[in-house]
Amino acid sequence: MRKVMIFGIFDGLHEGHRKLLREAKNLGDYLVVVVAQNHIVEQLKGSQPRLDLAERFAHLESEDGVDQVLVGDEEQGTWQVIKANHPDVIALGTDQKTLKADLESHLNEFNPKPEIVTLDTYEPNPQPTNG
């Protein structure tokens, strides 16, 4: 079984989130979604999320294709959730560059080492291309 893990705040699911969840699920057999705790969201964004952790968690649990929802680590950068759940793949959005760099700097702490994949950007109204 190929386990895929994705991280996020998921403060009100929208079509962009759903697309990322579908793309992540397509990378494996079992999708684990890790939801950031409220105090981590405040550290990252400078404000609390609109929805509390329990609401965000419940919304994700009801999404098609999501096999498991976990609460993110108490402290940023410890990666306990990865160490405890051993994903084969970690899927990230294109806006998660800082997260990707931090993960890559900690790869030697994970056994086995997961593959890190950046998913396509969601564009609700893509601009037409010439040509």
Image: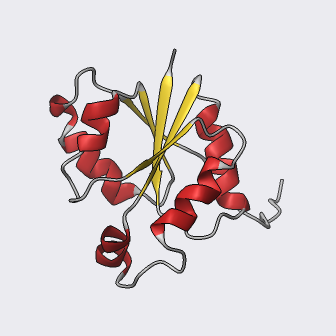
Numbered circles on residues, count: 0
Q: Residue furthest bottom?
A: 47
Question: Which residue is drawn at the image coordinates 47% and 57% (left, top)?
Answer: 8
Question: Which residue is drawn at the image coordinates 33% and 27% (left, top)?
Answer: 86
- Res. 121 in view: no
Q: Which one is nearer the viewer's eye here, 105 or 73?
A: 73
Q: Residue furthest top?
A: 1
- Res. 66 in view: yes
Position of 19 compared to 120: left or right? right
Q: Which one is nearer the viewer's eye here, 57 or 47?
A: 57
Q: Which one is nearer the viewer's eye here, 23 or 2?
A: 2
Q: Residue 92, image x and y in percent? A: 47, 47
Q: Residue 53, image x and y in percent? A: 46, 66
Q: How is the image coloured?
A: secondary structure
Q: Which one is nearer the viewer's eye here, 100 or 89?
A: 89
Question: Which residue is drawn at the image coordinates 76% and 65% (left, top)?
Answer: 124
In which image quadrant can residue 130 be found?
Answer: bottom right
Question: Which residue is drawn at the image coordinates 68% and 41% (left, top)?
Answer: 22
Position of 82 compared to 58: left or right? left
Q: Residue 113, image x and y in percent? A: 28, 25
Q: Is residue 41 above or below residue 48?
A: above
Q: Residue 35, image x and y in percent? A: 45, 56
Q: Is residue 19 above or below residue 14?
A: above
